[in-house]
Image (cartoon, helix red, strand yellow):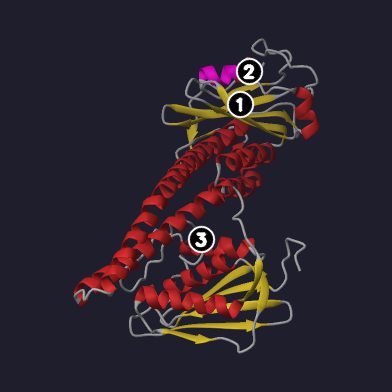
Amino acid sequence: MPSPATDPPRQSPGGVGAPNTGFDSRAHALIGSFSQAVKILNTSTSLASVLEDLARISRSVLNARYGAVAVMDTDGEIAQFVTAGLDDAEIAAIGDPPRGRGLLGAVIISGRPLRSADIASDPRAAGFPDNHPPMTSFLGVPIRSGRRTLGNLYVTDKTTGDEFDDVDEWVATVLADHAALAVERAELSAARDAFLSVAAHELRTPVGALRLAVESAREQAAGHGTPPAVRELLRELEQGIDELSLEVEDLLDVSRLTRGALPVQRSTVDLREVCQAAVDRVRWTFETDRVVTDLPSAPIRGRWDRRRLERAVANLLENALQYSPMDMPVWIGVTVSRTQATIEVRDQGAGIDPTDQERIWQPFARGTQSHGARRGAGLGLYIVREIVSAHGGRVALTSQPLVGTTVSITLPLRPQDSNED
């Protein structure tokens, strides 16, 4: 029965032990698929997607008929078990997921890679439950971060040979190292999202109460000869509360997005009015007349969520104002065709570095060239993209150094995801 090699492995340039025998002859075939596998893991966002991608990728890269990933709880028991290669009917027929006995348990207990040429004849095996498909060769490796075991990666039934070898073990181990980073990133992201959801809901009530109190104070101050300095202070307080309220709404929307699609409440609205309301909002918030509009004279009606679209347009205008010089205007225009409408927001700022142009659409990301104070947590463009996507539309960005940036929102005039007229 084959077992893991005991000789000290040769160190690869990346520091991970690579096997001597047969590695060079297979490296070229593996490198393309392995690089793609790592790229997918690095872009997986949730723990569920990390596990599903890892099970699927390991099966493909290691030429296995079946792949599986187990995630451990704090007591070292299997908390989640995700498979690849089994269809829904086969999974249902097997019944409960494994509890970590047999060869799976041997990997968990030892914390080391384990190979077997034939599961059924291996004395460490615990047998298969009823309705389980037959499996022969086996390879399992732990997914570790420091001294902590996060889970285990398993593949069975080598499709290009009788059993898994040293090269397969090395590839699986390196893949598990990348998976450990992806699992930890997903766990941190989930913890952050849970915190943001709780924080946003807890903040919503006191912020609302504070706004009502300031509005009441402003109404009383307006009719009793209150000094102008006090009225101005109350106005600034109300403006600050409005900005804080928008930040809370951003956090709430991020928490909603982590639980599923952003809800869209459609009604018949005029896109010109949506854009004008967004312009009025940022003119008041930024106390500026730098926003120049070019809106059609005829109505542009569609079935959209007015509140969310106004917010998306306002976010683009705020970004344009913050990332362009204080003496330069920001332009917004709307064009319409038979099937779609396009909103463009253009500034004359320093432009967005090409390395930032993809990253800035991610949550909590910022550009690097702002003029003046930066409001917010870096959620604006991420929420713009999700609002537009929820409407069946798309966003696009073009930017040139020292010329400026144009961001466009294109929306279908008729809903693509509903039967509404």
Q: Position of residue 43 (x, y in %)?
A: 55, 50
Q: Which residue is nearer to you in this view: 57 or 356?
A: 356
Give the Cα separation between the discs numbered 2 and 1. 8 Å
Q: Earlier in the sequence, mark 3 or mark 2?
A: 2
Q: Earlier in the sequence, mark 1 or mark 3?
A: 1
Residue count near mark 1 (Cα–Cα under 10 Å), binned few <14, some 14–19, many ≥20: many
Q: Image check: 92 left or right of 17?
A: right
Give the Cα separation between the discs numbered 3 and 2. 44 Å
Q: Are marks 1 and 3 in contact (CB under 8 Å)?
A: no
Q: Label 1 belongs to which residue?
A: 140
- Identified by mark 3, the residue type is Tyr
Q: Label 3 belongs to which residue?
A: 382
- Identified by mark 1, the residue type is Gly
Q: Nearer the viewer, mark 3 or mark 2?
A: 3
Q: Which residue is nearer to you in this view: 415 or 77?
A: 415
Q: Position of residue 230 (x, y in %)?
A: 21, 71
Res 352 → quadrant:
bottom left
Describe the element under mark 2 as helix, strand or loop: helix
Quadrant holding the N terminus: top right
Q: Is residue 108 magenta?
A: yes
Q: Earlier in the sequence, mark 2 or mark 1?
A: 2
What residue sits 51% from the left and 49% below the top? 255
Q: Which residue is nearer to you in this view: 256 or 106?
A: 256
Q: Which residues are magenta?
A: 105-110
Describe the element under mark 1 as helix, strand or loop: strand
Q: Label 2 belongs to which residue?
A: 103
Q: Image check: 375 left or right of 55?
A: left
Q: Are marks 3 and 2 in contact (CB under 8 Å)?
A: no
